[in-house]
Every structure is written in C-alpha cells, then in structure tokens.
Image (cartoon, rainbow, N blue to C red):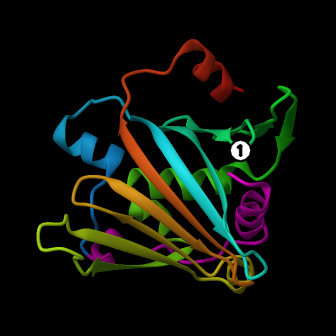
Amino acid sequence: MNRRLLLVLLSLLSLGLSGVAQTSAASLPAMPQWGIERSKSDVPGAPQLLKGTFIQQKQTRFMRRPIRSSGTIIVSANQGIIWRTETPVTSTLVISQSHIISIDSQNKRQQLGGASGLNMVFLNALTGNWQGLTEHFSLSVAQQAKQEPQAEAITCVTLMPKSEVTQSALQSIDVCGTKEDIREMHIVEPGGAKSLIQLNLMPYKALSQQEQSLLTP
C-alpha cells in the first residue's frame, strides 16, 4: 500500500470521527457475505483468517500511466492485517488492533499512529462486516451489469463518508465481489486520485510464528 493512501486513511479516521449515530442492523440493505463473514456462516468456529494476493494501481490527474504494485495480504479478523508489497519495491505494512508498523526493504521499522481507525475500515471491508462501518459511512449496494451472459454477477458496496472531515480526505470506497468472494476495492480521493486494488483471498488455517509476531504488540 503506498504511503499517500495510508496517510489519507489515517487522517480521515483520526481527526474527529466521533459523534455519528450508528445505523441499526435492520436498516441496512441486503448485504453480500464475503470472506470471513461467509466462513463464519458456513462453518461455525472456522478460523477467521484470509490470505491471498493483491494488485494495486494508483492513478492521479498528473500521471500518464498508473503506478502498479503487487504482493500478498493476510487478514485476521481478531488481530489485524499484514500487507506485503513485493513489486516494484519490497515493503510490509502491519495494521494490528494496537499499532501500525511500516517495514521497508532494509527491514527498518517505523511506528505509525491511528491504528484503531484504519484497522476498522480495512478489516470490516475485507471481511464483509458491514455493520462495523455504518458509524462513519453511508452504505449502498448495486449489481454491476454482466459483460457476458455467463459471467459471474458482481455486487458492489459503496461507502460514502458521513462527516465533513472524512469527506475532505476521502470521496468514496467501492468494495466489489461475486456471490462468494471480494474481488476489488476502488478508492477515490477528493483531488481526483484513484486506487484500484484487485484481491484474490482464500481461507487461511493459521498464522506462522513470524506472522503472529508481527501482529502481537
């Protein structure tokens, strides 16, 4: 994940997001069940872990071509996210419930702030926990038109920030997927910058010792 996108999300979640009334579960539209939420429904007691790959493309008004990065991602509903960028530059971003750590290609670590807010957005969006997002975002659901008759139906959940502070840093987030799996996240910033994150996530049995150490304070 590039530093600019991280700072945008940190700013929108750490600068006064309190005081917004939470939406009741009954008022939510029919929402898709993805990833961990689907696993919990299908197999009670299943490990709340996902692991897979991502491809991110970042485009601004001043770029002729988007910046492309790729790597792996681990999502733990209980502990956080490990986001490893492998190309074009190696780096790791660890977002736990207590801290955010950035690790560069030289294994140099930097502690960042705002863990609770950023953790909430990514964990809830990636795991399909929509109720956890209603305090700070208005949610709507739409079906994308099929490009081919036999293509899988794509559902998109659009997150629109409620507060003016949030709106100054983030225009919208679209989380899209099939009936069973999240596939993409589209993030639009007010200045026109856009990020497309393509995801391929699968259930993951257990964290390795190294992964566990990254997420443990």
| Residue that lies at the very extreme toward the top in this rendered image | 209
Nearest the viewer among 24 and 51 is 51
Indicate left or right for 126 with 120 as reference: left
Q: Image point 71% across, 44% down: which residue?
A: 88
Amino acid type at circle 1 is Pro
Q: Image point 49% across, 73% down: which residue?
A: 22
Please state the horizontal and vertical placement of residue 157, each as a whole percent of the image. Answer: 39, 72
Please state the horizontal and vertical placement of residue 200, each as a whole percent of the image. Answer: 40, 46
Please state the horizontal and vertical placement of residue 203, each as a whole percent of the image. Answer: 34, 34
Q: Quadrant of residue 152?
A: bottom left
Residue that numbered label 1 is attached to: 88
Nearest the viewer among 127 and 24 is 127
Task: Work out whether 40 lies above or below 165.
Answer: above
Q: Using a 10 Å C-alpha cutoff, classify the residue at mark 1 as few (fewer than 14 neighbours), some (14 to 19) or many (20 or more).
A: few
Task: Work out whether 71 lies above or below 155.
Answer: above
The stretch drawn in magenta includes residue 147: no
- In magenta, the rendered stretch is 1-29
The C terminus lies in quadrant: top right
| Residue that lies at the very extreme toward the front in this rendered image | 64
